[in-house]
Structures are given as C-alpha cells and as structure tokens.
Image: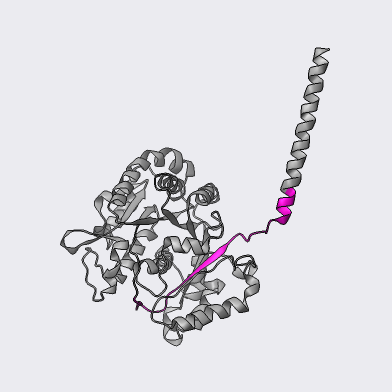
C-alpha cells in the first residue's frame, strides 16, 4: 500500500514537471518568434587618403599591445614608427610636432630621448623572437618583453590553452602587470593573434581571459586572423578557430576579423600582384591596423578611442565582431590615374573587394558602420557623403538601430 502511494506521488510530481517544461517551452517559443533576428556580421571601415593630420585636443590615454605568435606584429610597429618619425634605434627623427603630441599612447619614453614600444611579444617557440630581434626594428623593443617557450604548440589549441601555454602565462602576466603600472591612464589592451595555429588561438585566448580577470574594466581589443578553407596551412585550423571563437565572444570588447583569403584576393585582383608573399599580406593587415589606431595616435576633429568605438559600434556585448575595410587600395602603376576624393574613397570602402574578410556585404545587412577618414578634408563634405550613403542604402541597414 505504501509502495503504491509512493509511486502515485512520483507520478504526480512527474506530471507537474512535464507541465512546467511545456510552459517553459511555450514561453521560449513566444520569445523566439518576437525576437528580431540579428545578422551574423557587422562592419567597420577605415579610410586613408593622405599623410597629413588634423589638429584638435583630446584626453591622452595609453594602450599597449600583446602579440601572440603573429608575424604582422613587428610590421605594424615599423609602420607606426615611421608615421611618428621614430627610427629603428628608437630615436625621434621627425619634423612635425603632431608626431610627438600623442606618442605616449603606444610608446614609453626612456632615457636619451629613446622611445620604446609598449609591446609584449609572446610565442611558445624561440624562432619567431629570433626573427624579430634580427629584423630592422629588432632593437627597438624592450628585451624583458620577449616571453617565449621552447617546445611550441604544434598547431594544437589544447597545448596552447592548457599545457604549454598555461606554464608560460604567469610570466606573461607579470610583464603585463609591470607595463600596466607604468601607464598614466591605461585605456585597454590590443592583442594581435591568429586563430589557425596553436599558440595564437590557444594561448592567445588564455591570455585574453587572464587579462579580463585582472583588468575587468579595461577595453580588450583583438585583431584576429581567421583561417579560410581556400588558404590553409594545416588541417586542424577549423578546430582551433572554433575553440577560440567562444573565448572571443565572452572576453573581448572589439574583435577585428581578418582572413587570408580576402587578403590574397586583394593582392591578386586589386594590387595586381602575380605571386603575393606573406610579407604582402602582413603589410595589408598592418596598414589596416594603423588606420584603426590613427584616431588614438593623432589629434582630429572627431576624436575617438577604444571605448568610444565600442559604445558606437556594439549594439549588444556579444555582437562585437567587426569586418574592416581599407581605402585607397590601388595597384602601384595606377596610383597617379586615380583621384582620392571623398566620394571615391566612400565608394571604395563599401566595395566587397576592399574588405579584409571574405564576405560580400550585399548578401547581408549592416548593424553599424564607422568611417574613419584620415588627412586634410572638408568635414562638411564627409558628413554629406555619409548621409547620402545612409539614405540611398537604407535597406541594407537594420531598422532597429537609428
């Protein structure tokens, strides 16, 4: 008798649980139907026209870069050192005061007027570090900021995230702490890494999570080179990228997606290079990164920083994956035949051939767009051109973001 009562009570509880589950499913279905479907990607564009800069004042905040096994890292420093008039020994050789006005955003000033990049270079094998040291700008980096292992990750995400990388991460975080304490107003971190290998994906995402844990209120910005099925070195690249994306969704505030397929297409179709090298690809990535950071490094009429960019570009915290574009991109022999006007640059920046990720914007919709113009130009002309683009292409923008 007692057994039957117990079974009856269990049946009652099971039926109640089923009713609760059905009610929950009904609520979820209702919410799903009412929820607006979001496009998977959004865009940010960077434009470069001339090397002259506008003048204005803004708060100076410091940023420092962490590089996890990414060859374009030193190319980026070559480009911005040249823009700021810094020679390979760290000495200032420029002639324009604007070059020094915000140089502290990316450089520390050491003794004897030597400027040292605020950069930490990380890898799980020494080969990359040796290449940097022997390169033209190898002596500009602080020796203590080279952190590397001996074994490598072997294109294995788990090695970079859980074993080899985990053994090295404390040393990296110690250097991060020292550099952070030397900043007057730390705005955020920029990580340059690849999602296809083991170190950039595995250890790179481990480093992001550790930095987020230590500095939860600072902006985390990553430049992530995404693998492509058409341009692939190893068979496990999709696995490494898949395991990394979750970490980027949770722990970064801004992620700029770049893939080798789009870079190769730009080299072949636009720049007319017959056999592009990785040096050519790295140069494209670096000039794009330089364009992104121009508003941090030089004064302008509409100054932006990492936080302002995130506020204006990210509608929801997890939707922070940007697809950068760059203009002008012109073959070497054709440069003198092309006008660098605001309409021409605007047309180029919305062209799929100028995107650094292999995705045609005509097959989706924009959530947000940021256009960064560099050089001496009319603000009125830029505003009119942007308004014209928005009005003519309103169907390509989601209606729920004003």
Magenta-tinted stretch: 29-55
Is residue 33 highlighted in magenta?
A: yes
Task: Choose top left, top right, bottom left or bottom right for residue 221.
Answer: bottom left
Instruction: Estimate the x, y position of residue 102 in percent, counting from the top left.
Output: 30, 67
The residue drawn where x is 45% and y is 87% is: 337
Q: Is residue 246 left or right of residue 48?
A: right
Which residue appears at 52% of the width and 66% of the height? 262
Q: Position of residue 36 (x, y in %)?
A: 67, 59
Quadrant the N terminus occupies: top right
**Figure check: 103 above or below 237:** below
Name the foreground residue: 260 vs 41. 41
Residue furthest to the left = 112
Is 195 on the left or on the right of 52, as rendered?
A: right
Relative image position of residue 306 (x, y in whole percent): 42, 61
Please give the count of numbered marks on the rendered protein.
0
Q: Position of residue 289 (x, y in %)?
A: 41, 65
**Residue at position x 45%, y 45% in the image:** 209
Q: Residue furthest top?
A: 1
Residue drawn at x 78%, y 32% is 16
In the displayed structure image, the side of residue 164 where residue 392 appears, left or right = right
- Viewport quadrant of the C terminus: bottom right
């Amino acid at each position: 008798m007692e057994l039957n009562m117990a079974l009856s009570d269990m049946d009652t509880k099971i039926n109640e649980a089923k009713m609760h589950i059905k009610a929950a499913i009904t609520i979820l279905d209702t919410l799903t139907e009412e929820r607006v479907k979001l496009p998977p990607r959004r865009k940010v564009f960077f434009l470069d026209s001339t090397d002259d800069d506008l003048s204005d004042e803004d708060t100076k905040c410091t940023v420092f870069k962490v590089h996890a096994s990414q060859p374009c890292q030193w190319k980026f420093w070559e480009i911005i050192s040249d823009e700021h008039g810094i020679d390979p020994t760290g000495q200032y050789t420029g002639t324009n005061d604007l070059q020094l006005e915000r140089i502290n955003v990316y450089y520390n000033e050491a003794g004897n007027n030597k400027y040292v990049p605020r950069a930490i270079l990380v890898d799980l094998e020494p080969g990359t570090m040796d290449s940097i040291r022997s390169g033209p700008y190898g002596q500009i980096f602080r020796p203590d900021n080279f952190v590397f292992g001996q074994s490598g990750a072997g294109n294995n995400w788990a090695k970079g995230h859980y074993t080899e990388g985990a053994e090295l991460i404390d040393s990296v975080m110690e250097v991060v702490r020292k550099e952070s304490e030397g900043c007057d107003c730390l705005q955020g971190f920029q990580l340059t890494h690849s999602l296809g290998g083991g170190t950039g994906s595995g250890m790179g995402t481990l480093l992001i999570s550790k930095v987020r844990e230590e500095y939860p209120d600072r902006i985390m910005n990553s430049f992530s080179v995404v693998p492509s099925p058409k341009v692939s070195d190893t068979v496990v690249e999709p696995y490494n990228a898949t395991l990394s994306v979750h970490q980027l969704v949770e722990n970064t505030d801004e992620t700029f997606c770049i893939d080798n397929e789009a870079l190769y297409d730009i080299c072949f179709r636009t720049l007319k290079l017959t056999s592009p090298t990785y040096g050519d690809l790295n140069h494209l990535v670096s000039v794009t990164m330089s364009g992104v950071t121009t508003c941090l490094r030089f004064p302008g009429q509409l100054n932006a920083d990492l936080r302002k960019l995130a506020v204006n570009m990210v509608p929801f915290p997890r939707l922070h994956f940007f697809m950068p574009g760059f203009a002008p991109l012109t073959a070497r022999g054709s440069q003198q035949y092309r006008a660098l006007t605001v309409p021409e640059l605007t047309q180029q920046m919305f062209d799929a051939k100028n995107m650094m990720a292999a995705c045609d914007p005509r097959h989706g919709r924009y959530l947000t767009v940021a256009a960064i113009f560099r050089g001496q130009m009319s603000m009125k002309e830029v505003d009119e051109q942007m308004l014209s683009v928005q009005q003519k292409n309103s169907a390509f923008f989601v209606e729920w973001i004003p």
